[in-house]
Image (spheres, grey):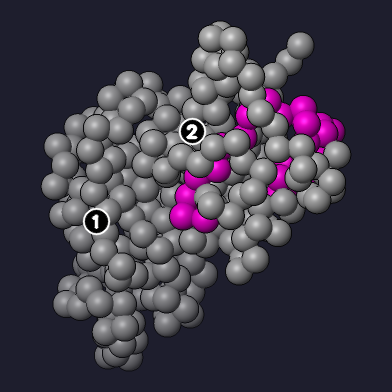
Amino acid sequence: MSEYFAGIDIGSTMTKVVIMNKGIISSTIGPTGPEQRRLANKVMEKALHEVDLPFNAITYIVATGYGRINVPFADKQITEISCHAKGVSSFFPEAKTVIDIGGQDCKGISINSGRPIDFVMNDKCAAGTGRFLEIIADALRINIEEMGEIGLEGKNPAKISNICTVFAEQEVVARLAEGVPLNDLVAGILESLANRISRMVNRLKVAKEVVITGGGAKNVGLVKALSDKLGHATVVPSEPLLTGAVGAALLGKDIAQKAIKNGLSLERKERYLKEIEIL
């Protein structure tokens, strides 16, 4: 009989779900909204629908991310630090350092055999996060998905003196009005962001293999700038937003199999079956 495990990662800007058997059989990514409990139900329903599974076919569900407490049907809640470590290691067994650039936070994690051994996080300021890039892209009226490619074309990265999001936004608009080429402005922004992130991550003992995850990992210019600043080649998962959810599902699998091996029962939250309407 096949066993299925699910991980749901509610981040500050995006919510991710994966369902796993021997590998990933279903995944869903969508924006995080204010009604997180309803959102959790909705994305879980979508992921189950993709593979035509009822909710009670899932052996174990782990929730992670800053909104993990808002997943009422989860069997367990685990921090994103542990889940990212586990998820990254499943894709890159030799990984030693993880840099996760999310919408509203950035973290560096030292890992060993899929377990976190140390980590650092940025402060509450948006600088160093995906939100920072969104604000700058809006100010420059460019598509954030194209930002990395635009930055790679910059030959003389502009020096950006402000790291505060508000002042950096004002500075790049003023520099653009002065005639600084857009490519050089974007390259300067990415270099400034990479410098900030690398200073934070270097508080750890950075060792290869270095893996970059989160929405920021989709920005090729930022990835290159980070590699240059760290002095290490970096790798990016094929879908860098899913590593936390994958790690959550894999940790759930470990927990469930250990419980079954020791003759322990897995209590299911049957009272939520009708409530979430995904039977």
In the image, is 252 to the left or to the right of 91?
A: right
* Residue drawn at 30 percent across, 70 percent down: 125
Whole-percent x and y of residue 103?
A: 44, 61
* Residue drawn at 51 percent across, 41 percent down: 77
Characterize the local packing of mark 2: few (<14), some (14-19) or many (20 or more) Cα atoms within 10 angstroms: many
Q: Does residue 145 belong to the magenta stretch?
A: no
Residue tagged 2: 247
Characterize the local packing of mark 1: few (<14), some (14-19) or many (20 or more) Cα atoms within 10 angstroms: many
Give whichever of 104, 276 is nearer the camera. 276
Q: Quadrant of the C terminus?
A: top right
Q: Measured along the vertical axis of the image, is residue 96 above or below residue 223?
A: above
Element on which disc 2 rests:
helix
Q: Measured along the vertical axis of the image, is residue 3 above or below residue 58?
A: above
Mark 2 or 1 closer to N-term? 1
Give whichever of 161, 245 is nearer the camera. 245
Q: Measured along the vertical axis of the image, is residue 58 above or below residue 84?
A: above
Element on which disc 1 rests:
helix
Whole-percent x and y of residue 89?
A: 40, 27
Q: Quadrant of residue 94?
A: top left
Q: Which residues are magenta?
A: 43-67
Residue tagged 1: 197
Whole-percent x and y of residue 268?
A: 70, 32
